[in-house]
Image: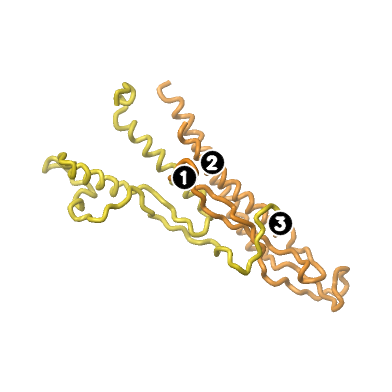
Amino acid sequence: MSNPISSYLGLQADALPLREQRMKLIASNLANADTPGFQARDLDFNAALAAAARTREAGGQSPLRERADHIPLPGADALARVSPPRPAWTATVSTPMPSAPPTAGRRWSTGPR
Amino acid sequence: MSNLPIFDVAGSAMRAQSVRLSTLASNLANADSVAGSPEQVYRPLEPVFRASAHASDPALTGVQVAGIVERDTPPIQRYEPGHPLADAQGYVYAPDVDPVSQMVNLISASRSYQAGVEMMNTAKELAVATLSMGR
């Protein structure tokens, strides 16, 4: 954050890579809309936030909810009891299979005909 | 410019959908191509898509045409003794192509191709907007 522009932009400068990452995931989902068996992916913000808060508390830092009158975070209440760590992205959408994968009975040609 | 690999993904989707459009065009064009024996008849083609992870970025997954499958549905036997291609019993053989389902498939492929174009336009607009930031 030594860059004056990034310090001026603050959180937005950090938000841009997040949006870019999400755009990449959505572009991949869109590109594979007709791919049989493809599992669509998206970012799970609550899980990522909960994981970030967990590591913050595990590192001895103050929790994200520092005062009693702070609005509780959606994932923050589950911090104590969420035991298995979830990855930052999880598959939230499943795509239907438009066509069955090739079977052994079919003839194949990989090159242009 | 770090969001250029999106063009690879959008391009792979458009390439895959254009292969699909080509096979559909072949199927529709040959729906009435009859042959004198079941072996010589045109076989409807179908592309098989496969997700392929982008080499540089694990968040990106493009599409790859794994192959083009010839469907082995039995051809339709039609009795046309006057046809020049008819066999000794007077039968000709037509491929089992359903024009209605092919047209539905064609519309779906066309929409998916348009989604690829739209993806590319969006990525381009965002890249230009990022470049013009602070101007």
Who is closer to the viewer here, A85 or B124? Answer: A85
Q: Which residue is mark 2?
A: B8
Q: Are marks 3 and 1 in contact (CB under 8 Å)?
A: no
Question: Is label 2 on the same chain as label 3?
Answer: yes
Among numbered discs 2 and 3, the one appearing first in the sequence = 2
In the rendered image of this protein, which colour is used for chain B?
orange
Residue at the spot x=60%, y=50% of the render? B17
Say which element carries label 1. Answer: loop
Examine the image and state in which quarter residue A21 appears: top left
User: Split into 4 quadrants, where in the image is the N terminus of chain A?
Assistant: top left
Q: Quadrant of the C terminus of chain A?
A: bottom right
Mark 2 packing: few (<14 Cα in 10 Å), some, or many (20+)? Answer: some
Please state the horizontal and vertical placement of residue A90, each as a whole percent of the image: 36, 52
On what subunit does the disc labeled 2 rest? B
Q: Are marks 1 and 2 in contact (CB under 8 Å)?
A: yes
* B79 with respect to B50 (left or right): right
Q: Nearer the viewer, mark 2 or mark 3?
A: 2
Q: For chain A, give the colour.
A: yellow
- Identify the subunit bearing mark 1: B
Q: Residue at x 27, y 52 (%)?
A: A85
Q: Which amino acid is tagged 1?
A: Leu
Residue behind mark 1: B60
Count of picture labels: 3
Image quadrant in which you'd find residue A49? top left
Earlier residue among tags 1 and 2: 2
- Residue under label 3: B26
- Secondary structure type for disc 2: helix
Q: Is residue B86 above or below residue A31?
A: below
**Distance between the alpha carbons at the discs numbered 1 and 2:** 9 Å
Q: Tell me the amino acid under the disc marked 2.
A: Asp
